[in-house]
């Protein structure tokens, strides 16, 4: 680790009900360390001694050229460094997912290990232990998210020079968990109409479903919207992670959605909307496939209407490769299979007609 030219005092700052001290690594990377909650330490002066002691150890460790201070446990790094840093960089929902996966599946395996002692083999054995405990009760996507959470933690540790390599790289989760049926994850136009009929008496729910179905937004993008984003013709889509004005784009609003938007009066909570929608499902054949099913449904419905995949990619704000791989390929395979069976049917009927004709000839 490179030596700093001067000692740092650090700066104390309050965020999300906690006190933090901020300082910089030798390469300029910002680091935040959690000192305690505002509930336990109401005033800034209450944490001054803690901040001074922490920065003394940081400067002492750097001056000695050692990693003793920075090489704490994975749990300490997650709570005191990873969470504070990511609070400033990512949206609240993604951070909540990281914390949930850490608490449910990862803390028991990694929490007490020293950060610098974790190897690729350690990670692989831990993932296998999680699979041995939960098996196929968890989906493959859940194991994938657990691995992604670990990778994010160790990527930050590597960026801050706490470790030399990311030990998650090279690990495998093949065969872990059941596969989700992606082909069943898209709402048809008929299903969208049925959902709109189901919530017709609630304008806010109707508008929420319309926005998801006819704009194809991701969940965080929907929750970042407010009624001021709509100007009567287009919808301004604010990027939930980027606050610069130039990061906003506008999407055209079609007539069916325009008729729903007057009922949109407040910011959207997808969790609350899902709760109220599910309460209305009465076993009438409607199946809840999640909010992302509306995005997949938009791509599917556009493709079945003959829209070019390049145009679909522009509407979804994806690359054409991603659009084809996740939305189009299954449909194309299904179409080719259907065409093949149509040819078989035609050949069979032709042979059947020839056989009847031969049977009707005079002997």
Image (spheres, helix red, strand yellow):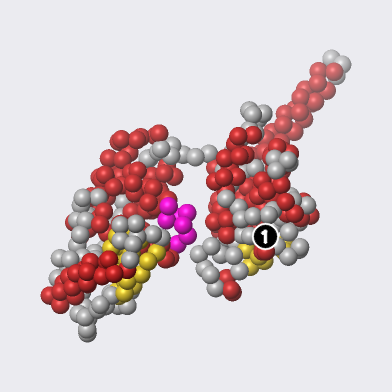
Q: Main secondary structure of the magenta part?
A: helix
Query: For the view shown, which residue lies furthest in the right direction?
Result: 362
**Closest to the observer: 194 or 59?**
59
The quadrant of the picture occupied by the N terminus is: bottom left
Magenta-drawn stretch contains 94: yes
Q: Could you tell me which residue is drawn at 31 percent across and 47 percent down?
A: 106
Q: Decide if residue 229 is in sight here.
A: yes
Q: Quadrant of residue 168?
A: bottom left
Q: Nearer the viewer, residue 325 or 302?
A: 302
Q: Residue shown at 21%/65% (left/top)?
A: 70
Across and down, in percent, residue 45 comes to: 29, 69
* Residue at x 58% of width, y 73% of height: 245
Quadrant of the image containing the C terminus: top right
Residue placed under numbered mark 1 in the picture: 227
Seen as rendered, the residue at the extreme bottom is 5
Going by the image, does 309 lie left or right of 166? Answer: right
**Residue 303 place in picture, x, y as percent:** 68, 51
Does residue 155 lie above or below 9 as drawn?
above
- Image mark count: 1
Instruction: Count neighbours of disc 1 (C-alpha within 10 A) and say few if under 14, some if 14 to 19, many if 20 or more.
Output: some
Q: Which image quarter: residue 137? A: top left
Judge whether 131 appears above or below 309 on screen.
above
Chain part drawn in magenta: 90-96
Q: Is residue 13 magenta?
A: no
Q: Going by the image, does 356 lie left or right of 136?
A: right
For numbered disc 1, what is the local secondary structure?
Answer: helix
């Amino acid at each position: 680790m490179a030596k700093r030219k001067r000692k740092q005092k650090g700066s104390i700052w309050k965020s999300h009900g906690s006190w933090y001290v901020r300082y910089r690594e030798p390469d300029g990377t910002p680091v935040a360390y959690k000192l305690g909650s505002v509930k336990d330490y109401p005033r800034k002066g209450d944490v001054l001694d803690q901040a001074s002691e922490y920065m003394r150890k940081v400067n002492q460790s750097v001056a000695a050229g050692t990693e003793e201070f920075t090489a704490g446990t994975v749990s300490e790094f997650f709570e005191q460094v990873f969470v504070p840093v990511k609070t400033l960089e990512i949206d609240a929902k993604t951070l909540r997912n990281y914390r949930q996966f850490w608490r449910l599946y990862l803390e028991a395996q990694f929490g007490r290990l020293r950060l610098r002692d974790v190897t690729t083999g350690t990670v692989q054995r831990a993932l296998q232990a999680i699979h041995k405990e939960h098996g196929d009760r968890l989906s493959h996507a859940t194991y994938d998210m657990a691995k992604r959470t670990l990778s994010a933690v160790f990527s930050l540790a590597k960026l801050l020079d706490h470790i030399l390599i990311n030990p998650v790289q090279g690990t495998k989760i093949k065969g872990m968990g059941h596969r989700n049926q992606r082909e069943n994850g898209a709402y048809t136009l008929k299903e969208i109409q049925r959902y709109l009929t189901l919530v017709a008496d609630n304008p806010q729910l109707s508008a929420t479903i319309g926005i998801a179905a006819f704009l194809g937004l991701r969940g965080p993008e929907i929750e970042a919207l407010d009624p001021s984003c709509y100007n009567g013709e287009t919808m301004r889509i604010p990027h939930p992670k980027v606050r610069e004005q130039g990061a906003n784009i506008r999407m055209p609003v079609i007539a069916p959605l325009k008729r729903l938007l007057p009922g949109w009066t407040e910011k959207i909570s997808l969790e609350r909307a899902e709760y109220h929608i599910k309460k209305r499902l009465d076993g009438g054949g409607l199946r809840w496939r999640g909010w992302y099913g509306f995005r997949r449904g938009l791509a599917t419905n556009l493709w079945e209407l003959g829209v070019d995949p390049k145009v679909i990619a522009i509407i979804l704000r994806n690359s054409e490769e991603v659009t084809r791989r996740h939305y189009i390929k299954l449909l194309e395979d299904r179409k080719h299979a259907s065409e093949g069976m149509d040819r078989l049917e035609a050949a069979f009927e032709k042979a059947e007609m020839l056989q009847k004709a031969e049977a009707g000839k005079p002997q």
